Image (spheres, rainbow, N blue to C red):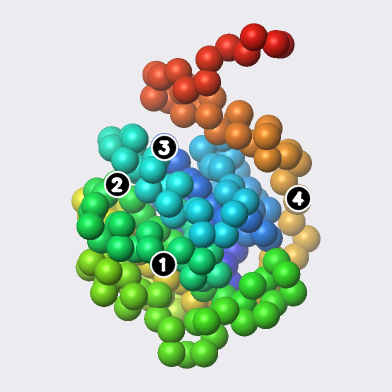
Amino acid sequence: MKRYDCMKALAARLKDELVILSLGASVDEWYNAAPHMREASLFQQQLGCVTPEAFGLAAGLPNRRIVSLDTDGGMMFNLGILATLGNEQPKNLFVVVWDNECYQSIGGPPTHTASGRVDIAAIARGAGVDNAFTAHTLEEFDAHCAAGLAADVPYIVVAKVAGTVEPDIRRKHSDGREDKYIFVRHVEETEGVVIMGPSEHN
């Protein structure tokens, strides 16, 4: 199945959630698939940090649903986060792992999941995340999105997607610093909190 099709299915179910996503082509795909989530989405540039950042948001905003859009390569960089989720059991965290079995952004060398032996969902269950599943069809993925967004325990779906990028989509027209402020101001406005106060040097 195509990652972009999965993104559109997930986006149709989102309204006031916060989303952390991985770097690479998936950023442009997400901002095209979910334009209404633009201010509520933030991409993380370091592999291995997407789900940990999402977990931090889930812990800090326990009444807000947080969505992590991670990758197989990113998850392989930090499997320890699965043990953390298993122990901490955040009630408001839904994790999607785009598993295309390759490091797409650097030319496509295979990840460990390409061997057919490494199963991220099984690793997650072994780490204590009972609701961890693998989806091979869009229908399966959409069903897991519905369940994961309604769950009161951590929920992970590993989406087996093709190693292709959606063609002819608009590039995200902002840099990382701008994205940070867009996201933070959105959280401040919707949560009624101050995260970053006024600058002394405007």
Left or right: where does residue 146 sit relative to residue 32? left
Q: Circle 3 is placed at which residue position? A: 16
Give the mark nearest the N terminus, 2 or 1.
1
User: In whole angstroms, how far apart are the C-alphas of marks 1 and 4?
Assistant: 30 Å
* SS at circle 3: loop
SS assignment at label 2: loop
* Residue at mark 2 to residue at mark 1: CA–CA distance: 20 Å
Q: Of the residues shown, which amino acid type is indicated by label 1?
A: Leu
Residue type at mark 2: give it: Asn
- Please state which of the two labelled residues, at mark 4 or mark 2, is closer to the viewer: 2
Residue identified by numbered label 4: 171
Residue 30 seen in render:
no
> Which badge, 1 or 4, comes first in the chain's sequence?
1
**Mark number for residue 92?**
2
User: Quick check: marks 3 and 4 in contact, CB under 8 Å?
Assistant: no
Point out the frontmost of discs 3 and 1.
1
Quadrant in which the C terminus appears: top right
Identify the mark nearer the N-term, 4 or 2.
2
CA separation, marks 4 and 2? Answer: 30 Å
Number of numbered discs on residues: 4
Lower position in the chain sequence, tag 3 or tag 1: 3
Mark 1 vs 4: CB contact within 8 A: no
Looking at the image, which residue is at 51% across and 66% down? 77
Q: Position of residue 131 (x, y in %)?
A: 26, 66
**Who is closer to the viewer here, 37 or 64?**
64
According to the image, label 1 marks what residue? 79
Q: Amino acid at mark 3?
A: Asp
